[in-house]
Image (cartoon, rainbow, N blue to C red):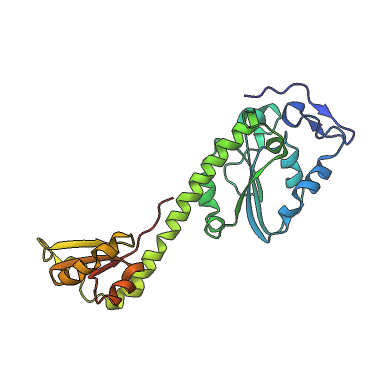
Amino acid sequence: MIELKTPQTNIFGETYFTEINQLLFAKQSSESVYKNNYASLFEPKEMLYLVVGTDGGLFYKYIKNTKLPEHVYFVFLEDLDVLRQIGLDSEISDGLDEPVSLVSHHFKLNIISSKFSHFFARKKVRILKSMAVVDSQKDSFYGVLWQQVKSSFDTLSSAIMLAQNSWQFENARLLNAADNFIPIKQLGRSLEGLSAVLIGGGPTLDDSIEWIKKNQEHLVIFSVGRVAARLLEESIVPDFLFRLIRMM
């Protein structure tokens, strides 16, 4: 928890908190700070930005008052107690219906991914540090807040990536449908009692290749797809081909 003391006002009439941004805004306006550090945010035609921290509300207000490209969205995640102390808790929006939304850092990121699923699917999502996070130490209030949100974001991104990769198998089933004259369930127990070998691409393949070639008529051969060409060169015809995927 961070306790905010008396807010300071700079010569531009902006209120800032030294506990959040130290003296960053003491002699320069928030507009100049953000134009110098975040000008590239408005270049993409399509992007979802998840921003950790609001700089005592200054970053949030700056983006909210900026004309954004049509398909660019911002979701600010801030500590709920901070939002209460700076008087922005009334602007918290769980609906995420506006181009610029403000939520508590406890807000579930999977709700954001559901609302903006097309952005996640096309990898048009970035997680950003506010200036409070940029200038923070790793074990400070905003340093810890960043690590918490970033960890949740990375976990969510990995899960979405794995889910997207599963579509390759669905597509393969559709493409192979015309050749699947015999459904696998019709094999029933016909393979029961037979000896099977599982062939990968490891160094033991060279040691076993001759034995497999001699005994293939008595074996059910399962092979990863990437060594199928090598097997055919050795006149070995696998019964089943499959593909391995690496779990992140």
Q: Residue at x 32, y 60 (%)?
A: 203
Relative height, residue 198 to residue 174 (above, below): above
Task: Report the number of numbered marks.
Answer: 0
Q: Residue at x 24, y 64 (%)?
A: 208
Tell which of 209 and 177 is nearer to you: 209
The picture quadrant where one finds residue 222 is: bottom left
User: For the N terminus, which image quadrant?
Assistant: top right
Relative height, residue 67 to residue 1 (above, below): below
Q: Is residue 246 left or right of residue 180?
A: right
Q: Residue at x 66, y 51 (%)?
A: 99
Task: From the top left corner, tell me how far across and down residue 91 is, in percent.
Answer: 66, 38
Tell which of 106 and 199 is nearer to you: 199
Relative height, residue 102 to residue 125 (above, below): above
Q: Is residue 159 left or right of residue 28?
A: left
Task: From the top left corner, tell me how far across and down residue 196 is, in percent.
Answer: 18, 62
| Residue furthest to the right | 11
Do we see residue 79 in this rendering?
no
The picture quadrant where one finds residue 221 is: bottom left
The picture quadrant where one finds residue 195 is: bottom left
Do we see residue 18 in this rendering?
yes
Task: From the top left corner, tell me how far across and down residue 74 is, in percent.
Answer: 65, 48
Tell which of 153 and 199 is nearer to you: 199
Task: From the top left corner, tell me how far across and down residue 144 is, in percent.
Answer: 60, 32
Q: Is residue 142 left or right of residue 122?
A: right
Q: Residue at x 14, y 72 (%)?
A: 217
